Image (spheres, rainbow, N blue to C red):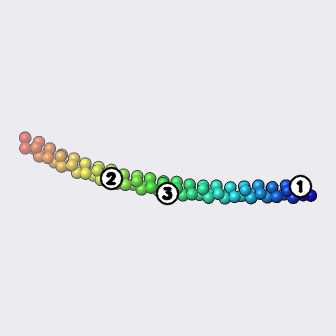
Amino acid sequence: MAEYGVIGVMVMLFAGQMMFLQKTLMGKLLEIENIVVKLIDRWNISDERAERRYEKSVAEMNQITDCLHFVKGRINGRGS
């Protein structure tokens, strides 16, 4: 009878340990998931900033090109 009691206690301790490890690991996984989500959000914000910077530089280059074409047209118009 005592042997069954000891086996029961050992099974309960093992089950308790498994439950503790599961809760601990799930907590860590949730922390990692939150970190990854924040990292992805940060990358998205960084990409948006880079895209806005690129669009501004393209707009400035277009303005410079327009001015250059205007000056080129004026020079070619006077030569005739």
Q: Secondary structure at mark 3?
A: helix
**Which residue corresponds to the image point at 11% horizontal and 46% vertical from the top-left?**
74
**Which residue corresponds to the image point at 44% horizontal and 53% vertical from the top-left?**
43
Q: Mark 3: which amino acid?
A: Lys
Q: Mark 1: which amino acid?
A: Glu
**Mark 2 or mark 1, which has the lower sequence index?**
1
The crowd level at tag 3 (other Cα within 10 Å; few <14, some 14-19, many 20+) is: few
Pointer 1: what residue? Answer: 3
Percent of width and height locating residue 61: 25, 48
**Which residue corresponds to the image point at 18% horizontal and 46% vertical from the top-left?**
69
**Which residue corresponds to the image point at 16% horizontal and 48% vertical from the top-left?**
70
Percent of width and height locating residue 28: 60, 56
- Judge left or right: residue 54 versus residue 78: right
Marks 3 and 1 close (CB-CB < 8 Å): no
> Relative to 8, does residue 75 appear above or below in the rendering?
above
Pointer 2: what residue? Answer: 53
Percent of width and height locating residue 20: 69, 58
**Mark 3 or mark 1, which has the lower sequence index?**
1
Q: Nearer the viewer, residue 24 or 30?
A: 24
> Relative to 68, does residue 7 appear above or below in the rendering?
below
Q: How far apart, in angstroms, are the residues tagged by discs 3 and 1?
A: 53 Å
Q: Secondary structure at mark 1?
A: helix
Q: How far apart, in angstroms, are the residues tagged by discs 3 and 2?
A: 23 Å
Query: Which mark lies nearer to you, 3 or 1?
Result: 1
**Mark 3 or mark 2, which has the lower sequence index?**
3
The crowd level at tag 2 (other Cα within 10 Å; few <14, some 14-19, many 20+) is: few
Q: Nearer the viewer, residue 57 or 62?
A: 57
- Judge left or right: residue 71 versus residue 61: left
Q: Secondary structure at mark 2?
A: helix
- Judge left or right: residue 80 versus residue 13: left
Percent of width and height locating residue 5: 87, 58
Pointer 3: what residue? Answer: 38
